[in-house]
Image: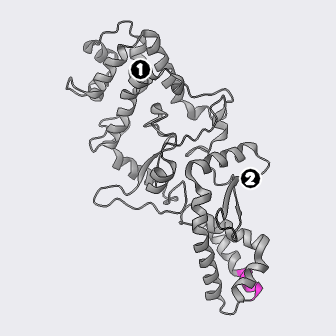
Amino acid sequence: MAEQVLAYTAKRASSDYDEADIKNKLPDWQRLAGKTKKSVIRKAVEKILKLPHSQRKMLWKAVKNDIGFYEKLDDPNFEFLYRKLPDSTKEVGNELLLRFYKILGSKAGFANLAGQKARLNGAILESLYREANKKCPICPACLLERLPRPVKGISQNDREHYFPQSIYPPLAVHPFNLTIACIRCNQRRHSNFDPISEHKAGALLDSFLPYTRPGLDQIELQFTPAATRGMVKLSGKPGDTHAVKRARNFDQMYKLSDYWSHYLEDIDYTLRETVRFRSPTPTLADTRRVLEEMRRLDEQTKTSEPEAFLRGQYTAWILSERLTIWFESITT
């Protein structure tokens, strides 16, 4: 809808706002802008029309380019263009583009959208996300927090913009940019951090992306339990340059190496208590058997149970590199 509005402003030769003309050219205009002349969207379009015609064309071109990013994930020539626009052009464009997200976040939301049976707002978006991701009821960023259900109709989670709307306004309501995340991941760690560390042609190749390029199978964890800090280090699997860069950028966004390090002592304690419970006087063979059972279970539930991914990776590391030392530490 935003792209259609901007296409209209780019193709219109005149800078005057003509209500009859825009209604004729955009059948959904009345539903989008509302009936009042004080509509924020109507005022935003009036400001866009005041831009020089060349800037209106650049604005439309940039938005059209950026919202098609999900089809260019492996294109070595793709770049986001909106960020390159003059600040004055972006300032005017933001009034329109960011308004769409405010509408989505409001109780009223969007009504009568094509293909949509019910009103679309933030609450509906979260319910649709849960329905489509039944097998992943935990935060998709940290994998440690279970996404709580709404309380009295109020969401206990955040709508997460993977590409922050403050930097990428064309993606403010993009379905491939919005997900549901725990509040700590969205507000405390990610905030407005750009997932692209180096803007250049093909930069998307160095980023994990929601839905289309998840990172779970490309991430490798390294452990240093004796360290006073940095006990967990997140990296990409060696030998894959893109995986290494993707993991580094993802870690910079969500600070997972630091965050997971804080959890490692609790996870280690849980493993020890489980071994002792299952075998009050465990042998090395008993310890290996219990840990292998837990590792297999965590591998099966790594996207559905909080801590399962981190615990499974840590357990696999103990089994492969530290079993004898770890066993001795729980029996002495």
- According to the image, label 2 marks what residue? 237
> In the image, which residues are magenta?
283-289
Label 2 sits on a secondary structure element that is loop
Disc with the residue nearer the chain's start (1 vs 2): 1
Classify 33 as above or below 13. below
* Foreground pick, 60 / 87: 87
Quadrant the N terminus occupies: top left
Asked if residue 301 shows in the view, the reply is: no
Horizontal side of residue 16 vs 215, given as left or right: left
Label 1 sits on a secondary structure element that is helix
Amino acid type at circle 1 is Leu
Q: Position of residue 219 (x, y in %)?
A: 68, 54
Q: Position of residue 283 (x, y in %)?
A: 75, 89
Q: Position of residue 49 (x, y in %)?
A: 35, 14
Q: Residues within 10 Å of mark 1 (few under 14, many from 20)?
A: many
Badges 1 and 2: C-beta atoms under 8 Å apart?
A: no
- According to the image, label 1 marks what residue? 6
Q: Quadrant of residue 69?
A: top right
Q: Residue at x 63, y 71 (%)?
A: 297
Which mark is on residue 179?
none
Horizontal side of residue 232 vs 110, given as left or right: right
Q: Quadrant of residue 223?
A: bottom right
* Foreground pick, 240 / 123: 240
